Image (spheres, rainbow, N blue to C red):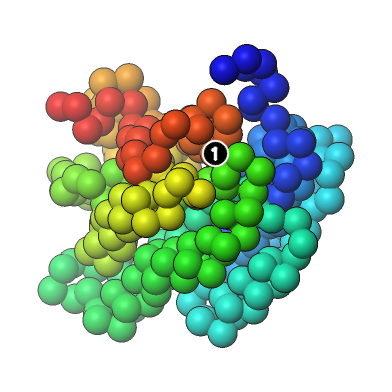
Amino acid sequence: MSGWLDALHFRGSPVLITGAAGGIGRRLAAAFAELDAELVLVDRPGADWEPVRAALQGLAVRPVTYLECDLEDQAERQRLIDRQVGNDQPLAVLVNNAAFVGTSDLSGWAVPFAQQSVETFRRALEVNLTAVFHLCQGLAPSLGRARGGGAIVNIGSIHGALGPDWRLYEGTAMSNPAAYAASKGGVIQLTRWLSTTLAPAVRVNAVSPGGILRGQPETFVRRYEQRTPLGRMGTEDDVVGAVLHLAGGWSRYTTGQHLLVDGGWSTW
């Protein structure tokens, strides 16, 4: 390949990012904007877009579209798909970043296994796995028309590949719900399935972050760092670099891969 730096740029091609108002989504939006992508940013109704706009200040020279979509709602997902498929300009990249992570006060979520509810399990799978399937299926025709082929990057989790170490959570209000792990494990396998199904027109890969430092209790952070070869928790920017690599021209012969960005956590 010639023009290694040129291969990083998207030349105004549209990139759709779900969960774009969150920490990782916001950093992804800024990075893709800096690499000359047109942005289609999606998050749930009522999302706070101001930090995203601030992050894009001075970076976005291409159009930026902000869309609200409840990914738990099939009809809303279909409207999002129809809108994008109806666009004459093919989609270059789809980043399935949005995730149902729940809250500590959500019934049947951050509680012991015996108390985790079937209803909450279903809700998590709908957003974290079914929505990924639906968007990939619906947007595949647009991605397939992209110059040089489109790319899908699904955001998984180390919890979708590994069992939880419950010692980390002792004495904290934190938890590790089965629904989150099962849904992210499904995303990883769906990535492999899609990679052979959509080839050669669309490449499909997954990035699974390890723990991201976000104000967790000090005891949890200390235990996590001691358990990690690189000696720290991850940051949003650690994830962004992996996504850009798999989305862009540097990885045009890479598909069906699952990249763990976990500071070496999974190597012990």
Check disc 1 and give the amino acid type.
Ala
Instruction: Tell me: 171 left or right of 247.
Output: left
Q: Is residue 167 visible?
A: yes
Q: Residue at x 75, y 65 (%)?
A: 87
Q: Return the residue at label 1.
A: 247
Q: Residues within 10 Å of mark 1 (few under 14, many from 20)?
A: many
Q: Quadrant location of residue 268?
A: top left
Pick the front one: 162 or 46 = 162
Return the x and y of residue 222 as percentages of the image width and height: 30, 31
Please determine whether, in this image, residue 244 is positioned above or below residue 16: above
Return the x and y of residue 42 as percentages of the image width and height: 64, 62
Pick the front one: 184 or 143 = 143
Q: Is residue 222 visible?
A: no
Please determine whether, in this image, residue 137 is positioned above or below residue 192: below
| Quadrant holding the N terminus | top right
Pick the front one: 94 or 241 = 94
Return the x and y of residue 237 as percentages of the image width and height: 54, 32
Return the x and y of residue 122 as percentages of the image width and height: 32, 78
Q: Residue at x 53, y 26 (%)?
A: 250
Instruction: Tell me: 62 left or right of 141.
Output: right
Q: Residue at x 61, y 71 (%)?
A: 81
Badge 1 marks a residue whose secondary structure is: helix
Q: Residue at x 56, y 84 (%)?
A: 75
Please determine whether, in this image, residue 245 is positioned above or below residue 60: above
